[in-house]
Image (tube, rainbow, N blue to C red):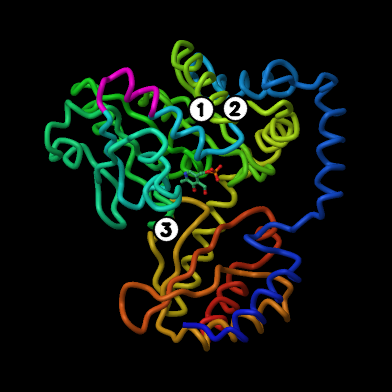
Amino acid sequence: VTSEETRERLQAAVRGARVVSWRRRPTPAETFARLGRACEELGIEEWDQYAERGAVARLEAEVAGLLGTETAVLFPSGTMAQQAMLRVWCDRAGSRRVALPDLSHLVQHESDGPRTLHGLDLEHLTTGPRAATADDLRALPHPAGLGAVLLELPLRDAGCLLPTWEELGELAATARGLGVRLHLDGARLGESLPHLGRTMAEVAGLADSVYLSFYKGLGALSGAAVGCPADAAAELRRWRHRMGGTLYRLTPYAVGGLVGLREELPRLASYVAWARELAAACVERGLRVQPDPPHTNTLHLLGEGEQEAAARALTGVVEREGVLPCSPWAPADVPGWLRSEVAVHGEALDHDPAVVADWVVESLG
Ligand SMILES: Cc1ncc(COP(=O)(O)O)c(C=O)c1O
């Protein structure tokens, strides 16, 4: 537990930091100016209207090209995108059952939306910090009766954990053999490619539909897209409209996505490499890392400590360096241990991982 005073001091330090989540925080004016320049650089002269034409059509075509899917559909959020996609697959299958990890975003962070809005019946494919395998799918009761199976690549709440390419292929083949549609929560799919050793299209080719976020590694304001076959995309667009997601103008989000694909996607592998260097330096200093080595640009750190002391120590580091090197330490499952998440983006590359590892150790108190 952290005292109110300590929490407020830490929050104030974080608000004043130059770099958070290893990104420099531009002001709203700087962000809008960047989007304006991007429109000129990319020759975007036309607005979309209700998600048709303009930057939206362009982004959807680019994403479909990257994923190798027939079509891609832009959404204002991943939450809306994935609920819509699962709704489509379940309606087609005539089953409300969706198998997914208990740590999935849909279970943990969507206020029960999949059930209350769409009547979906979520079943746990895995429990805890573990990558799902074909055996997990086969072990469910009557797996052929599922409406869909969802894999979160990587599993964020487990330190961005991934299966191997072989495990993923076997799971996909098992789903196909059962006649169950496979949807990938690829919010951080670009960040997963170095570990999987495959292209985006190769990974997406295993699944029936894939969601991609524009504001995780890709650094846009918000927004997401789902790649899927054209007939499913038509249904997805209807659901987007019904759910209020077909905004009159989606251009600001679409331009952000186009910038992210150009500027951030090619750099994600360098963020993963830096995260691995940081992890090794933290392990040398006695911390634990999950997964070790990291599978993506995001990892969990674990160390012995006390939360109040850690919050004070982290505040000191943030006030001195102007950088929040890792998320505030929170209790881990083991008594006396704390856990923190590090998500590595562009600003990290200007720093020596060994120096940052020293800050991290210091921040544990
Ligand atoms: C793995 C995963 N899936 C889905 C989402 C939902 O994305 P959005 O915030 O765009 O609704 C997130 C967002 O953090 C996520 O991390």
Q: Are marks 1 and 3 in contact (CB under 8 Å)?
A: no
Q: Is residue 90 magenta?
A: yes
Neighbor class of circle 2 (other Cα within 10 Å; few <14, some 14-19, many 20+) is many
Image position, residue 260 (x, y; %): 68, 38
Check mark 2 vs ligand 1: CB closer than 8 Å? yes or no: no
Q: Main secondary structure of the magenta part?
A: helix
Task: Say which of 334 and 77 sits in front.
Answer: 77
Q: Which residue is mark 2?
A: 74
Q: Which residue is mark 1?
A: 226
Look at the numbered disc 2 and give the secondary structure of its residue.
strand
Cα distance between the residues tagged 2 and 1? 7 Å
Q: Is residue 1 left or right of residue 274?
A: left
At 25% across and 26% down in the image, what residue appears?
95
- Quarter assignment of residue 99: top left
The residue type indicated by label 3 comes to Gly
Q: Report the span colored magenta.
A: 87-95
At 50% across and 14% down in the image, what residue appears?
234
Q: Nearer the viewer, mark 3 or mark 2?
A: 2
Image position, residue 243 (x, y; %): 54, 30
